[in-house]
Image (cartoon, rainbow, N blue to C red):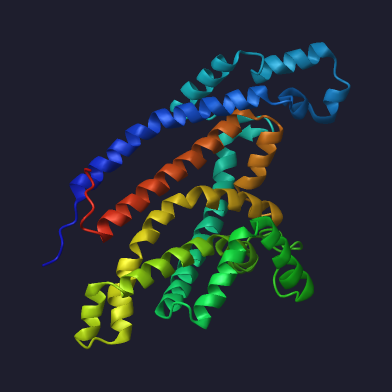
């Protein structure tokens, strides 16, 4: 008999998490404004650029009033929050355009990079983890585990620079960065695909060790359990035992890993986008931070926080669907 999906409990849990997210996002945005206010960077001078070096104090004060940075911290935060709730995220002082336009223009490329990298990490991590778990202590297990532990300690930007040196400079088989070729003024699928290979591979490989180690341990433990031994005793093939029984049980711990890796994925994506000049959110985030762009910083932080909360919710939902012993209302 097929198991009935617990849509009701799932919806209630999602509703509770959504209500919990509202005050969390409010506190996070206030923290952004507080940190930015304590920053030594002057948003007025960053906005004025070289013109600010010769501008009079009166002109700088007027510009400060126009940007709204002369108001108290709480007033700036409250004005931004109430406008955001009405759908107005404000204008970016560093990008010189509405914050919503900045996000729309760049978010798609960041999502493409992160989703592709996540898929690479999950598929490679799962495949290698299953191979290593078949014979714990074997040469495959030892080799892949050694590489995984090495990659776990390697910074994403270092892997990116190494990939550029080897594949782009030494072998000259892949582009070093950007979204399209330097001589091209149009964006085509082929160019985007070729330019995506290196940053997605680097970001995916930087996340791979955790998926590999979780799957390897989970599948190895499942192979030693009584149900799997019983399946072998019934004469089922090793492939059926491994993929039909051990892998499903061994994948359960990895489902909780999906949500917990979202913060690391976001951080890694920022570094990888910077190294490969990928036109995503990274460049906007760096410029907003160094220029103390309150509106853009707050919006980007809300997006990152919402992604983390959504990732945690998704991992809990997946775990509950995969394991009928989990109660969504618990």
Give coordinates of residue 46: x percent, y percent: 76, 29
Residue occupying the far left of the picture = 1
Q: Can residue 229 be seen in this view?
A: yes
Q: Nearer the viewer, residue 165 or 126?
A: 126
Give coordinates of residue 158: x percent, y percent: 70, 59
Direction from residue 318 to residue 193 in the image, left or right: right
Residue occupying the far top of the picture = 58
Residue 59 location, quadrant: top right
Q: Quadrant of the N terminus?
A: bottom left
Residue 102 in the image: above or below residue 190: above
Residue drawn at 69 percent across, 33 percent down:
94
Q: Quadrant of the C terminus?
A: top left
Residue drawn at 51 percent across, 66 percent down:
120
Residue drawn at 61 percent across, 29 percent down:
91
Residue 227 location, quadrant: bottom left
Q: How many marks?
A: 0
Q: Is residue 177 visible?
A: no
Q: Nearer the viewer, residue 169 or 279?
A: 169
Give coordinates of residue 182: x percent, y percent: 75, 61
Direction from residue 47 to residue 35 in the image, left or right: left
Residue 111 in the image: above or below residue 247: above
Residue 138 in the image: above or below residue 275: below
Give coordinates of residue 56: x percent, y percent: 85, 15
Residue 48 location, quadrant: top right
């Amino acid at each position: 008999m097929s198991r009935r999906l617990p849509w009701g409990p799932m919806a209630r849990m999602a509703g509770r998490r959504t209500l919990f997210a509202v005050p969390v996002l409010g506190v996070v945005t206030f923290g952004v404004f507080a940190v930015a206010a304590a920053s030594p960077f002057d948003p007025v001078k960053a906005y004025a650029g070289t013109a600010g070096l010769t501008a009079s104090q009166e002109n700088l004060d007027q510009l400060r009033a126009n940007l709204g940075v002369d108001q108290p911290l709480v007033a700036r935060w409250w004005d931004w929050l109430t406008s955001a709730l009405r759908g107005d995220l404000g204008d970016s002082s560093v990008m010189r355009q509405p914050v919503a336009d900045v996000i729309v223009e760049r978010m798609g490329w960041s999502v493409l990079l992160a989703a592709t990298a996540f898929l690479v990490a999950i598929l490679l991590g799962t495949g290698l983890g299953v191979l290593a778990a078949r014979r714990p202590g074997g040469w495959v297990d030892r080799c892949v585990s050694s590489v995984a532990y090495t990659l776990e300690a390697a910074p994403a930007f270092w892997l990116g620079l190494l990939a550029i040196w080897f594949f782009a400079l030494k072998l000259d088989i892949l582009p070093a960065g950007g979204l399209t070729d330097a001589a091209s003024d149009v964006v085509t699928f082929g160019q985007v695909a070729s330019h995506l290979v290196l940053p997605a591979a680097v970001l995916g490989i930087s996340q791979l060790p955790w998926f590999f180690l979780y799957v390897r341990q989970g599948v190895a433990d499942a192979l030693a359990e009584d149900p799997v031994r019983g399946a072998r005793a019934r004469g089922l093939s090793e492939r059926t035992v491994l993929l039909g029984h051990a892998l499903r049980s061994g994948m359960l711990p990895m489902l909780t890993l999906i949500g917990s890796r979202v913060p690391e994925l976001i951080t890694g994506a920022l570094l990888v986008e910077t190294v490969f000049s990928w036109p995503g959110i990274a460049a906007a985030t760096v410029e907003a931070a160094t220029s103390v762009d309150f509106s853009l910083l707050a919006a980007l932080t809300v997006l990152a926080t919402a992604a983390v909360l959504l990732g945690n919710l998704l991992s809990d939902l997946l775990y509950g669907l995969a394991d009928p012993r989990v109660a969504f209302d618990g």
